[in-house]
Image: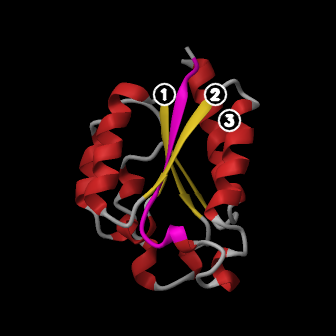
Amino acid sequence: MTATIYVLNGPNLNLLGKRQPEIYGHETMADVEAACRATAEGHGLQIRYLQSNAEHQLIDWIHEAREDAAAIVINPGAYTHTSIAILDALNAFERPVMEVHISNVHKREEFRRHSYVSLRADGVIAGCGTQGYLLAIERVARLIAAA
């Protein structure tokens, strides 16, 4: 059975390529998903690639991942800075979690510098553009192989 990585995307990431391209670039969600799939397949892994603007949906997918996933890669968007509920859900997931941010949140507004998700994440990648997703998949692939 092939191990699955859940790649979860939070609010407004459905607008990737259209919203503030000077910050987030011109790649679309479909572009990122294709690159994530290719990277995972290179490691003999598959992904479940999901996006929602709804906090409860992200939490439901994290709960689902407890049964189905070898790891989670998550870009929680603005929920990074506000959601204790997502943190609690991630704390119930006992396998690797990587947090991804397309922009360098540390060079942006002060409120973006705090992450609840980082309290659980095994690693954080920020400021590498959409390549951050691929770096996160590379990392969890190594962690899965070592387990």
Residue at the top extreme of this rendering: 1
Residue 87 forms part of the magenta stretch? no
If you read the primary sequence from the N terminus, does the residue marked by circle 2 or circle 3 appear first?
3
- Does the residue at mark 2 contact the one at mark 3 (Cβ under 8 Å)? yes
SS at circle 2: loop
To which quarter of the image does residue 114 belong?
bottom left
- Does the residue at mark 2 contact the one at mark 1 (Cβ under 8 Å)? yes
Q: Which residue is mark 2?
A: 45
Cα–Cα span, label 2 and label 1: 9 Å
Q: Position of residue 26 (x, y in %)?
A: 72, 75
- Is residue 93 in sight in this rendering? no
Residue 5 forms part of the magenta stretch? yes
SS at circle 3: helix
Please report the residue visible at 28 percent of the width from the left and 63 percent of the height from the top.
83
SS at circle 1: loop
Q: Position of residue 126 (x, y in %)?
A: 60, 63
Q: Amino acid at mark 2?
A: Leu
To which quarter of the image does residue 47 belong?
top right
Q: Position of residue 99 (x, y in %)?
A: 50, 53
